[in-house]
Amino acid sequence: MSDLYDARLSSAAVVRNRSPILDVLRNALPIKGLVLEVASGSGEHITWFAGHLPSLDWQPSDPSPAARASITAWTATERMTNVRPPLDLDASSRSWPIIAADAILAINLVHISLWSATQGLLREAGRLLPAGGLLYLYGPFIQAGVPLAPSNAAFDADLRGRNVSWGLRHLAEIEADAAQSNLVVQNVVTMPANNLSAILRRT
């Protein structure tokens, strides 16, 4: 058990945002089915959600071996029975190791990755989800006609300083790309700390 404990990664941001995200997901997710989380990171989000929504089957994923080890460790130490072993999944890949999902979550992925990752996410969500299936995006976005909060502007500059291909995305651009995969934005929910929850559905 000590080895598992040592493998667990932790994020202070998860503790801050997991409850507000869960409040949105309670009203957006199906009662039963398989929920795929893309870029699960430490695994803290998915174990929190799985513990509060036990009727759902949860599938974590991440391309990082360290992240997958952390997910496995969190799942074991929290004794989760409705969380599957994590998949080695790169959102930008055209060959995801899963054939279907009833809902897909991507938390803090879009702005800290290449645009090709968002394109892959939208493309595969359109392929994997059933009609009415949920694609949930969380993070800071740029909205037309809405002034960018100073903290988000500073965050965007910091991201682009680390990688010129990262940064906050325009929600309108995501919506346009999503339409090509038969996904429509159903609702956008304002979240704490200048973040948004974007609710997309497969038509």
Image (spheres, rainbow, N blue to C red):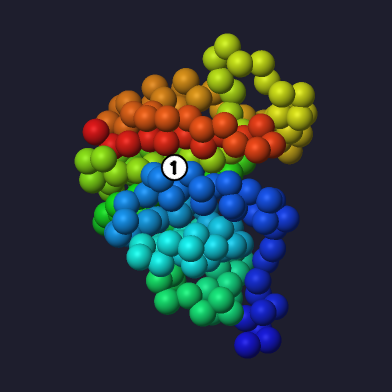
- Asked if residue 39 shows in the view, the reply is yes
Image quadrant assignment for residue 98: bottom left
Place of residue 179 in the rendered image (x, y in percent of width and height, measured from the top left): 32, 26
Residue at 42%, 30% (x, y): give it. Answer: 187
Residue at 67%, 66% (x, y): give it. Answer: 9
Q: Which residue is mark 1?
A: 136
- Asked if residue 65 shows in the view, the reply is no
Please indicate whether residue 6 sits to the left or right of residue 138 in the image.
right
Q: Is disc 1 surrounded by few (<14), some (14 to 19) or many (20+) residues within 10 Å?
A: many
Q: Which is more toward the observer, 10 or 116? A: 10
- Whether residue 135 is situated above or below residue 102 in the rendered picture: above
Q: Secondary structure at mark 1?
A: strand
Residue at 28%, 37% (x, y): give it. Answer: 202
The quadrant the C terminus occupies is top left
Residue at 32%, 51% (x, y): give it. Answer: 30
- Whether residue 135 is situated above or below residue 177 in the rendered picture: below
Please indicate whether residue 135 sits to the left or right of residue 48 in the image.
left
